[in-house]
Image (spheres, helix red, strand yellow):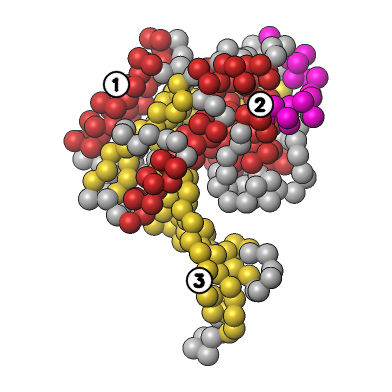
Amino acid sequence: MADLTNIINQTFPTKCVVIIGDLVADQFLNGTISRVSREAPVFILRHDTTKTVPGSAANAAVNVASLGGKPVLIGLAGEDANGGLLLDALRESGIATDNIVTDASLTTTTKVRVLAGQHYAARQQVIRIDYEASPDLDAATKQKLRDSLKAAGPNADAIIISDYNYGAVFPEIFADALAISQARGIPLVVDSRFRLESFIGATSATPNSDEVAQILGEDFTSDDCGQLCERLGLKALLVTNGNRGVQLFESGQSPLQINAVGGAEPVDVTGAGDTVIAAYTLGLASGMSFAEAAKIANHAGGIVVMKKGTASVTAAELTTSIAENNDPAVANHAK
């Protein structure tokens, strides 16, 4: 097996990953419950703070950067208050925003998580409020996104498609990404919340078990996943299963189960899939086998779910976790 620590420390920083997808402003509104309203049987929440962080495709880009890679983020944001907060948060994370198309007609997709608690008590999420962008884009906006991908393609070592069905990923831009991947021999990895079957021919995909169940039914088997991998034209399918770890279905190999690392009970699973695809894709871009890349992605996911809110993982955290939780089964499988 390759020396994963050396690859993470030495090769990740040399790799450029283009991320195409739906950008989300993840907002965390913290408040203190003071009393019950006289108007209705509900608690009154006194607002304390609101923090905006990059979510979805933007979170994948943050994770590529925190792991040492060079992200190029392509997506959409509105010229609204939340769009400005999102762009500011990206810049604070070291992510360039020149390839993000902004327009006054666009709405910045925003997910507001309300965290409430009494004085001196832990805050718990009580509700999430979503403000969603329309998936319908005009031809000019689509062309701007395609032009950004065309400009970024020659320097890319891998491409991520992060599709949450908010409009930034459409058939033409996926076809462009696929053509670049095939012409340059670089990995193209897809994460799609609702439309995985629309992306045929990518290198790999990273759905969670619920997304696979939407396609195969609740009682899907390993054989079903293997057949899905073939049907999608993938070289490998990485299915994440929460506290049950991940399963890798690779063409020509037996299914590989990689057990979860870290605590048995996650603190917060928000954005864990974005972390997984970032680590997995960086691994593939750096020459790791699918099994080796799946291993580091599993570690990355295990680390980030033990953090509150939309979070990222660092290269130092990843190498420490690998050293402390070595899995010989992965070493035996890796080519």
Q: Is residue 1 above or below residue 195?
A: above
Task: Please state which of the two labelled residues, at mark 2 or mark 3, is closer to the viewer.
Answer: 3
Q: Are marks 1 and 3 in contact (CB under 8 Å)?
A: no
Does the magenta run of residues contain 320?
A: yes
Q: Is residue 22 above or below residue 129?
A: above
What's the mark number on residue 47? 3
In 3D space, how far apart are the residues under numbered discs 2 and 3 (Cα atoms)?
39 Å
Secondary element at image label 1: helix
Give the quarter of the image for residue 115.
bottom right
* Tag 1 residue: 151
Does the magenta run of residues contain 298?
A: no
* Residue 40 in sight here: yes
Quarter of the image where the C terminus is located: top right
Mark 1 residue crowding within 10 angstroms, few (<14) / some (14–19) / many (20+): few
| Front residue of this view, candidates 153 and 88 | 88
Q: Earlier in the sequence, mark 1 or mark 2?
A: 1
The amino acid type, in three-letter code, at marker 3 is: His
Q: What are the residue bounds of the magenta stretch?
A: 318-335
* Tag 2 residue: 296
Quarter of the image where the N terminus is located: top right
| Front residue of this view, candidates 199 and 185 | 185
Residue drawn where x is 45% and y is 10% of the image: 185
| Front residue of this view, candidates 168 and 124 | 124
In 3D space, how far apart are the residues under numbered discs 1 and 2 (Cα atoms)?
30 Å
